Image: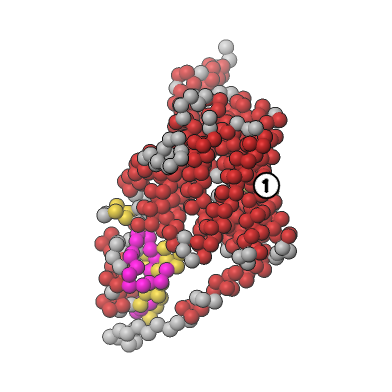
Amino acid sequence: MHPSIPVVSWLFQLHETHPAAQAIGIFALVCVAGMAIGSVKVRGIGLGTAGVLFAGLITGHFSKPVDHATLDFVKEFGLLLFVFTIGLQLGPGFFAALRRDGLRLNAVAVLIVFLGSALAVLCGRLFGLDSAAVLGILSGGTTNTPSLGAAQQTLAALPGMSERRQALPALAYAVTYPGAIVGIIASLLALKGIFRIDPAKEAAALEAEQQRPAEPAETRTHVVAHPNPSSAAAEREIVVTNHDVLGRTMGELGLDASRGVVVSRLTRADVALTAAPGLTLQFGDVVQAVGDEQSLARVEALLGNSVKALGETRFVPLFLGIALGIIVGSMPIVIPGLPQSVQLGLAGGPLLVALVLGRIGRIGRLVFYMPVTTNLAFRQFGIALFFAAVGLAAGPTFFGAVFSPAGLVWLGSGLAVAVVPLMLAGIFARVVLRMNFAVLGGLIAGSMTDPPALTFVNNLARSDAPMLSYVTVYPLTTLLRILVAQVLALFLIR
C-alpha cells in the first residue's frame, strides 16, 4: 500500500474520530475561501466578509460537513460578537446623534426601514410566498445580517416550526443579498443621474460648510498665564487613561486654575466635543490642552496619557457586557396585540447593552473600552463565523432554490425591497429636505447597513464625508430592523 493512503484515509475519517477538530477545520477553510472571494473587487467594490457566506454555500452544497447543533452555536456566537462590538464602538456618539441633524437623518432612515418592511410583506402576499421566506427576503433585501439572526431565533421559538421552514429565511437571504448590493448601488447612481449631481463638488461644499462654524474656534488665541513669562506655550493631545479621573467633570478637575492649562476641546469616538465644565471624562477621551511644558506635564500625569493602557483589551468588562446582553435579550417584552411576547434575542440584547455601556463608559472600576483595532478584529471574526454557519446550513438546498421559479421571485422581491424605499426616500430627502448628496449617500448606505455601498459613495464623492451620516443612522437602523423582523415573524407565521 502506498504510504500516503493511510494519511488520506485518516483525514477523511476525522469527522468520526475528532468531530470538534473537523468542524473547526471546516469553518477555518470556509473563512479562508470566503475572504479570498470577498477580496475580489470590481471598480473598487467587493463583497468583503460577505464572501464567506458564498464559500459556505458552495461547501455546504457539496457535502454535509458540520452537525446542526454546532452550526447553531457558531452562528449565534458569531452574531453576538458582531453586534456587541458594533454597539461598543458606536455607543459614545449614538445618543448625541439622535439630536439636531441626527434626528432628521434617523427619521429618513426609519422611513426607509418601514417602507422596505411593508414592501416585503406586500410581495409575500402578491406572490403567495411562505412567510418564513419573506423574513429572509427582508433581511437580504436590506443586507442586514442581525435581522436575519433575530428572525431565525424567533422562528426557532415558535411551536410546531419544521426544520424546512426554519431554514427558509437563511435561504432567501442568500438568494437576495447579492442582488440587493447591486440594487443599492444602482439607486445611488439613479439619484445622481436624476438630479444631475456632481458628488465630488457636493462633498467639497459640505466640508466647506462644516468648517465655517469651526473657524472662530480654530483661530482663537489662548493666553496662558504662568509664573515664568519666558516659558513657551504649546498645544498637546492628552489621552485620558487614569482611572482616578474617570467620571469626574472638567469643572471638578479645574485644569485651568489648578494646572495652568487651557483645554480647547475634547474628542470622544472621533466626535469633537466642547470642553464644558459639566462634561464627564471617559476612558480614551482625547483632551486638547494648551500650556507651557511644565503645566502640560502635570496634566499628563493627572490624566494618564498611557499608550500601553489605551491599547489593552479588558476582558472582564467584555464578558460581563456579553452576559448582560444575553440577559436583556432573553427578557420577554409584552406588546399589546401580539400573540406572544417579544425578545430582543442574541442580536438586539447585546447591541442595546453595548450601546448603553459604550455611552456611559464605566461602572465603578470596570471600563467598557475596547481599542479600535481589537474591536474591528472581534467584529470581523464574529460576522465571518456567522456567515460561514449560515452558508453551510443553507448550502444543501441553495442552488436548487436559486434557479427555481420561487427563487427568481425571491430575487425580484429582494430587489424591490432594496430599490423602491431608497428611491422614494432619496427623492424626498433631496427635494424636500435639500440634503447634500454626500450626506444622503451615507444615510442610504447606513440605513441598509451596507459597507460596500458606503465604499461606493465615498469613491463617488472622493471623500470620507458620507461616513458621518452612515454612523449616525447605523445603530438605530440595526436595532429597529431586529425588532421589525421579530414582530413580523410573530404576526406573519402561521
Q: Which range is magenta? A: 273-293
Relative depth, front residue between 169 and 442 = 169
Q: Is residue 146 above or below residue 25?
A: below
Image color mode: secondary structure
Q: Residue 469: which quarter of the image?
A: bottom right
Task: Indicate the secondary structure of the residue bearing disc 1.
Answer: helix
Relative depth, front residue between 229 and 454 = 454
Q: Residue furthest front?
A: 337
Q: Residue furthest bottom?
A: 229
Residue 224 belongs to magenta span: no
For disc 1, the marked residue is 182
Q: Residue at x 50, y 62 (%)?
A: 102
Q: Is residue 404 left or right of residue 105?
A: right
Q: Residue 206: which quarter of the image?
A: bottom right
Q: Residue at x 63, y 30 (%)?
A: 398
Give residue 122's position: percent from left, percent from top. Answer: 63, 41
Q: Residue at x 41, y 63 (%)?
A: 268
Give residue 354's position: percent from left, percent from top. Answer: 40, 49
Q: Is residue 41 visible?
A: no
Quadrant of the drawing holding the N terminus: top right
Relative depth, front residue between 89 and 91 = 91
What is the total number of numbered labels drawn onto the structure image?
A: 1
Q: Residue at x 45, y 31 (%)?
A: 157
Give residue 435's position: percent from left, percent from top. Answer: 61, 65
